[in-house]
Amino acid sequence: KISTCFEFVVGLDDGGAVTPPMGWRSWNLFGSHVNQSLMQDMMDEISSRRNLVDGVLTSLSDLGFTDVGLDDGWQACGNYGYANYTYHSASGVYPIVNQTRFSDFIEMTSYAHERNLTAGWYLNNCICKDHCTDDVCYQGDAA
């Protein structure tokens, strides 16, 4: 007796998720010693057409490596809020950015978009050893 099992998979044919997200993350190169200038320099490198591929000047972003991610090191560690969270505002809702290292997240994101890159941030804090586990600590992270 032969058993046969068929599974059908349905996907959208909209061009999305043709490949997994490809790009660069800051941690392996800079660790916690990252800043806005270094991130923007990496955005320039990823979008720079200086390598020949089949005789054509090509960038990493031309090859699909379009995601630039800031892993950690952007937070202002401290004791904030009613439960002394390590990088959230007094309300416990919004993360506090280290503005010495990152003067303007919006400008940095725009910088990425001007180069046809996406920019993202690792929101689960490690360097500050955040001990906030309440849902309220993550509501403002996506705002």
Image (spheres, rainbow, N blue to C red):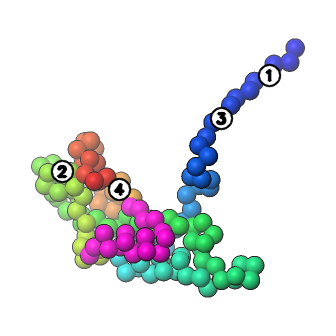
Residue underneath mark 4:
123
Callout 1: SS: loop
Distance from Cα at disc 4 to Cα at disc 1: 45 Å
> Which amino acid, by three-letter code, is at mark 3?
Val
> Who is closer to the viewer here, 63 or 94?
63
Distance from Cα at disc 2 to Cα at disc 4: 14 Å
Residue 139's x, y, as percent?
26, 47
Q: Residue at the location (28% across, 48% down)?
A: 138
Distance from Cα at disc 1 to Cα at disc 3: 16 Å
Residue 130's x, y, as percent?
28, 54
Magenta segment: does it hold 120?
A: yes
Residue sitting at the far right:
1
For residue 90, say whether it is visible.
Answer: yes
For residue 71, say whether it is visible.
Answer: no
Residue underneath mark 1:
4
Residue 122's x, y, as percent?
39, 58
Residue sitting at the far top:
1
- In front: mark 1 or mark 2? 1
> Which amino acid, by three-letter code, is at mark 2?
Gly
- Residue segment shown in magenta: 103-121
Magenta segment: does it hold 111?
A: yes
Callout 3: SS: loop
Callout 2: SS: loop
Q: Residue at the location (38% across, 61% down)?
A: 121
